[in-house]
């Protein structure tokens, strides 16, 4: 059986072992996948131990996604663009390849699972941390017309926008400006990539930035976030949390490792039934 793991700190609430076990079973792949708690200063050691025990790959989660780049001999384009790695693979020649499947997971969940169009749409992306960096490239590659990155700290949004300017039309706004009205056109899709939901906080967004027909996505899952509650209060009916992104980024990692695309629908329904 080939060995895989998810490495993070904390790790006990990770759904990844369960997700990959379901994928492996459904596609008859001989593999095991466990959760590994790494000490905060011990990522390299945790990965080295997994490899020494025959590990073929790992998912990397909070707070190690940026640090994991240093473990790689080579990076995929999307990991390079994201500046972060969530999937490590040991190649046949022993080299370690770093990839990032987060953005692909988000795009697939939005387009395929939610059935929301991305091509030609105007997107307001809240946050300018690692979560935003991971999804900007894949969103632009999916053909969105424009992305405005809004962040509490404007300088961080400006830095991200500059890094991605070559891929498409990107602007920035300070979060404080969102609370006020502005005269530009409203956004078709608002994605919350901040960690505000973890603090039970929403983001104050004025009426000119959205319409009832806009779609709203929160990358968090497992609880009714303040941001989605706000959207419900605005009569925005197209709302979605990040559970589908979680399952789809895992499916993409599974494909990177095994060359098999697992079906995600049954698993997504059962996780949804359990976590909601
Ligand atoms: P991640 O890797 O999850 O993106 P991060 O890099 O720490 O984590 O980034 C967190 C993001 O959430 C940042 O954009 C942060 O805004 P700042 O850059 O201004 O710090 C944003 N954020 C966190 N708490 C927030 C809050 N209560 N309101 C608005 N934005 C918040």
Image: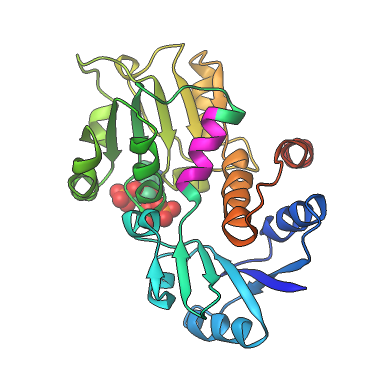
**Residue at the location (69% across, 55% down)?**
15
Which of the two residues, 203 or 95, is positioned nearer the viewer here?
Answer: 95
Residue 150: image location, x then y, percent: 28, 37
Residue 219 visible in the snapshot: no
> In the shown orientation, is residue 234 left or right of residue 207?
right
- 143 falls in the magenta region: no
Colour scheme shown: rainbow
Image position, residue 25 (x, y; %): 82, 55
When the figure is inspected, residue 30 is found, relative to residue 239, above or below; the finding is: below
- Residue 192 place in picture, x, y as percent: 43, 37
Q: Quadrant of residue 69?
A: bottom left
Residue under the image location 52 percent in, 28 percent down: 111
**Does residue 96 sit above or below 75 in this rendering?**
below
Instruction: Determine the image quadrant of residue 263.
Output: top right
Give the quarter of the image for residue 171.
top left
| Horizontal side of residue 188 vs 261, given as left or right | left
Q: Considering depth in this image, is 162 or 232 the residue closer to the camera?
A: 162
Q: Residue 242 vs residue 28: left or right? A: left
Q: Is residue 44 visible?
A: yes
Seen at 25% across and 22% down, the residue is 180
Residue segment shown in magenta: 103-111
Q: Residue at x 24, y 48 (%)?
A: 160
Provide residue 170's location: percent of width, then percent of height. Answer: 22, 35
Q: In what quadrant of the picture does the N terminus appear?
A: bottom right
Give the tally of numbered discs.
Answer: 0
Which quadrant is home to the C terminus?
Answer: top right
The image shows residue 41, relative to residue 239, as above or below, that is below
Secondary structure mainly formed by the magenta segment: helix
């Amino acid at each position: 059986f080939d060995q895989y793991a998810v490495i993070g700190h904390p790790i006990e609430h990770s759904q990844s072992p369960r997700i990959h076990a379901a994928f492996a079973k459904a596609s008859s792949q001989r593999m095991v996948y466990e959760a590994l708690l790494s000490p905060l200063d011990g990522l390299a050691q945790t990965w080295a131990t997994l490899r020494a025990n025959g590990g073929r790959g790992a998912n990397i989660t909070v707070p190690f996604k940026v640090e994991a780049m240093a473990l790689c001999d080579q990076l995929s384009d999307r990991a390079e663009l994201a500046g972060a790695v969530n999937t490590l693979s040991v190649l046949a020649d022993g080299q370690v390849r770093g990839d990032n499947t987060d953005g692909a997971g988000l795009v697939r969940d939005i387009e395929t699972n939610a059935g929301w169009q991305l091509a030609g749409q105007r997107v307001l992306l809240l946050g300018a941390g690692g979560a935003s960096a991971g999804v900007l490239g894949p969103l632009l590659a999916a053909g969105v017309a424009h992305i405005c990155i809004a962040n509490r700290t404007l300088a961080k949004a400006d830095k991200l926008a500059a890094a991605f300017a070559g891929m498409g039309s990107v602007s920035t706004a300070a979060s404080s400006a969102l609370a006020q009205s502005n005269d530009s056109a409203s956004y078709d899709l608002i994605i919350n990539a901040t960690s505000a939901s973890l603090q039970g906080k929403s983001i104050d967004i004025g009426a000119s930035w959205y319409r009832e027909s806009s779609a709203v996505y929160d990358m968090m899952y497992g609880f009714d976030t303040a941001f989605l509650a706000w959207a419900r209060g605005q009569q925005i009916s197209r709302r979605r949390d990040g559970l589908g992104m979680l399952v789809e980024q895992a499916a993409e990692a599974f494909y990177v490792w095994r060359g098999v695309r697992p079906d995600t629908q049954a698993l997504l329904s059962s996780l949804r039934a359990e976590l909601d």
